[in-house]
Amino acid sequence: MKKSIFRAWALLSITMLGPFALGNGLNLNNLGTRALSMGGAFVGLADDFSAVYWNPAGAAGFRTEYLGFYGTDLMPTSKYRLDIPFGTGTTTIVDARTKTSHYLGGMLAFYRPVSDKLVLGIGVYTPSGGGGNWTASDFTGLSGGTAYEWTSKMGILSISPLAAWKVNEMISIGAALNINYGFFSLSMPAGEIEIPAAPYAFDLGQYEENMNGWGLGATIGFMVKPSEQLSFGLTIRTPSTVRFKGDALISNLVLLGQSDVSDLERSIKLPLWIAGGVAVRPAARLLITTDFQWTGWGTMKTMETAYADETWKAMMRASGDDVRRMDWSDRIQLRFGAEYALNDAFALRAGYYHDPSPSPLTTMNPLVPTYTYEAFAVGFGWKSSGLQLDFGLEYLEGRERNVDYAKTLNDPAYAAATPGRYKTMFIVPNLSIGYRF
């Protein structure tokens, strides 16, 4: 009988510290340097080219053609350590740290007023993305002494045509269609199986996945601006299910007379997102923003994978690895930002937000381990005529998560958890260039 078709599959959280662990659940949550530098508290302002993401209604205020580019470099550092009881003390099975890696993201957006009230536009941007790149030798304790690859990469690219309408001098509305393309790749040990009458377990070798897929959603925004000193925003981003399709490889399965490749499918649901924001200018040169952002992660209770090959399907069903528990909960972010104009050309910015983890410790080992983040951002901008340049830096500190080894053995509630200590942080430099024609 099988020990675990995918013993290492239960440790996917190690590999996946990077791919999904930036921001709330699966989301990056920050697009556009000015918005990022103000802590992502931008729903009530949304007055630059990142409006397609934060609040499409903000685009109704653009009076000229407007082109903007945003680029960012996600630089994660993640750690994982697994100690297990041994004699009167403990022994370390894994003490790992990710390699230095760069995961690029960004946005390109263009807007054009077609009347005094109507503005059309389009944005192409990355709402989710990242990866993990571990040193193979750090995980030999989990793979029978063999240094298998432990790497992953994931991203979502959204193509969003937009229309914004200025109802009157105070009220604007806007909407964008989100055409989402996703890609995902993974390499890790496949684990072992027991073979009847054999004196040892059979090493299945390297496991690899490569998938991509599409999904549809929409973003709807409202903006109310009673005066030049005050504005309110509301944004609703509908759920979007990205249906990934691709293939998987188990390198040594062919030695057992079985196919080493199988087609597979897995759906990732980007959840409902509702955000409200306020922007207030208490002084001529000072701007303060606050956002309340709710994400409906509570719908993500399981993550299912369908394998086409009948042998693979039977193995995964028997091991329970075709359905992974998630048990996520809805979460709220509070965000705060400020901008101070030194003069007509230069502005300084700062922001902060608290980002609670949507997942409990009891499911820390599924495909998507998450953290509670404290995020800090700073930046500055310069503008002249129609040109604007912005530079920003964000730092996210993930609170350490510790899954007790004994609980995973003795507490049924922790049956889906991977024991060990998890830690991560991100440094995110970024820049934007915008031009109003």
Image (spheres, grey):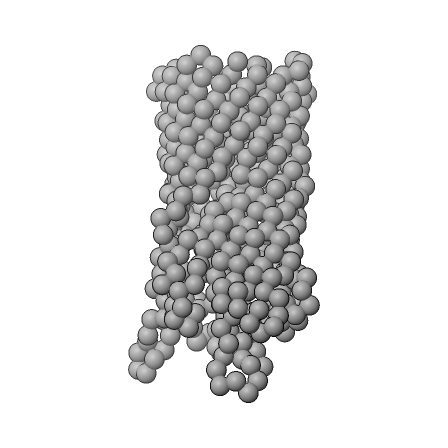
- Quadrant position of residue 57: top right
Q: Residue at x 66, y 25 (%)?
A: 163
Q: Is residue 275 above or below residue 66?
A: below
- Quadrant position of residue 82: bottom left
x, y percent for residue 216: 68, 41
Left or right of residue 224: residue 422: left
Residue 102 in view in this figure:
yes
Left or right of residue 373: residue 415: right
Q: Is residue 359 above or below residue 340?
A: below
Residue 166 in view in this figure:
no
Q: Residue at x 39, y 64 (%)?
A: 147
Q: Residue at x 48, y 53 (%)?
A: 152
- Quadrant position of residue 427: top left
Image quarter where the N terminus lies is: bottom right
Q: Is residue 175 above or below residue 84?
A: above
Q: Residue at x 41, y 14 (%)?
A: 384
x, y percent for residue 69: 49, 27
